[in-house]
Image (cartoon, rainbow, N blue to C red):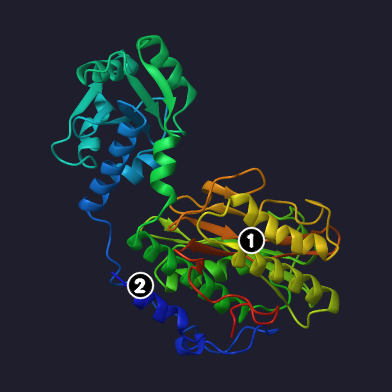
Amino acid sequence: MFSRRDFLKIGGLSLTSFGLGSGMVSCAPPETESKLTDMTAGVEPLTIRDFEKRQEKAVRLMAEHNLDGLLLTGSTDLRYFTNVEWGRSERTFGAVLNRKREPIWVCPAFEEERAKERIPEGQEIRTWHEHENPFKLIAEIMRDLGAAHGRLATGPTVRNFVLYGLKQQAPGLEMFNGAVITESCRACKTDKELGYMDLAAKITKMAYRDTFDRLSRGMSTGDVRLLIQQAHERMGAVGRGGPSFGPNSAFPHGSKVVRDLQEGDIVLVDGGCDIEGFRSDVSRTVVFGQPSDRQRQVWDIVRKAQVAAHEAIRPGVSCENIDRAARKVIEDAGFGPDYAYFSHRLGHGIGMDGHEYPYLVRGNKLKLEPGMTFSNEPGIYIYGEFGVRIEDCFVVTEDGARILGGMESTAVDQPFGE
């Protein structure tokens, strides 16, 4: 596993160390092959003990909130706590985490052998046949835990038909939103988890850098998306996301209008990858060719907003105040009021999901804590012209924040700080 020092060393490397040129954008693909290499070799995976620690924290939170169990079905939450990945279907499968013993599993009988391949050995699996009721089985589990009239929390992604079924089969149970457990556990990352996120962010930024060096006139968004994917793959990751060109960049999540790359176009890319299940999310905005004064002006305002938000981050500050710090810069520059041009929240939590609790948005008075991770992604979107967004993810530290993966933008023609 890479240490924090290793990641800081990676973050401080010039991209020329990886064989990449210093030019930002050219009008033709480079003649030389990319020298990107696998960066994931030697990454230490999560261990059984990592999952035990997560479950122990969940049990402590159950005790604090006087809850007897937490039901998780197929979801990121299930994978986070148990390392069991299972698709969602109409057949109820899941685990009841509890304060008295190891998780107890509920499984369709015909899936039992497949489940045994995934569930840690020794943990109890209770099965139900197709004509039987899985919610009755869950009620029996709670009864056997001495909590037939207890308090059962359900994961925030557990679907309504499960909740309705439990209300019918276990009317004595009090039902609660399990987010108080799942979100509290997942919001603050461990050093190992931050290591994964650091590396994922570094890989995505290097993939973009490699792609920008290969842009050429007439490329489609599909061409650029493929270059980004291939660059990720060379570094040992599976990349997601793609670009918008020119006026299409004014749509924060892209436009259906087909446009090939033209001289002077804004190129806005957004995407990421994951390492050991933990994600990156990075946006960069560059210009294919020479930036106009208007493009450079708007880019500079967005960057100032990102810096203002970053400087406001520290433990104890509310999430909404970070959003406000960035929004004020954009409004003061004449791109307001409110959501007129900066049309979305400043940022989202990130971890095993690309977007997860908590959020940097007006009205969220939650206080930042060390270990929380977010995106910082201000933007200005001018329909009919172009859009600019710059996105880096960060971790809250004891006295501020640290950018994951380094390589911060410093100018429209220096998207990685070189």
Looking at the rendered image, the quarter that the N terminus falls into is bottom left
- Left of 328 or right of it: where is 110? left
Q: Residues within 10 Å of mark 1 (few under 14, many from 20)?
A: many
Relative depth, front residue between 396 and 197: 396
Residue at 44%, 20% (x, y): give it: 163
Q: Does dot 1 land on a helix, a strand or a loop?
A: loop
Dot 1 amino acid type: Glu
Q: Residues within 10 Å of mark 2 (few under 14, many from 20)?
A: some
> Where residue 136 sits in the image (x, y, percent)?
31, 14
Please give the residue where the numbered disc 1 appears in the rendered image. Answer: 377
Relative depth, front residue between 345 and 216: 345
- On the image, which quarter does residue 43 sit in? bottom left
Dot 2 amino acid type: Arg
- Left of 299 or right of it: where is 88? left
Instruction: Tell me how many marks there are.
Output: 2
- On the image, which quarter does residue 328 sit in? bottom right
Residue at 84%, 64% (x, y): give it: 385
- Left of 379 or right of it: where is 238? left
Q: Which mark is residue 132?
A: none
Residue at 35%, 21% (x, y): give it: 151
Q: Is residue 235 visible?
A: yes
> Where residue 239 sits in the image (x, y, percent)?
49, 63
Q: Does dot 2 land on a helix, a strand or a loop?
A: helix
Please give the residue where the numbered disc 2 appears in the rendered image. Answer: 4
Q: CA distance from mark 2 to mark 1?
A: 25 Å
Relative depth, front residue between 307 and 225: 307
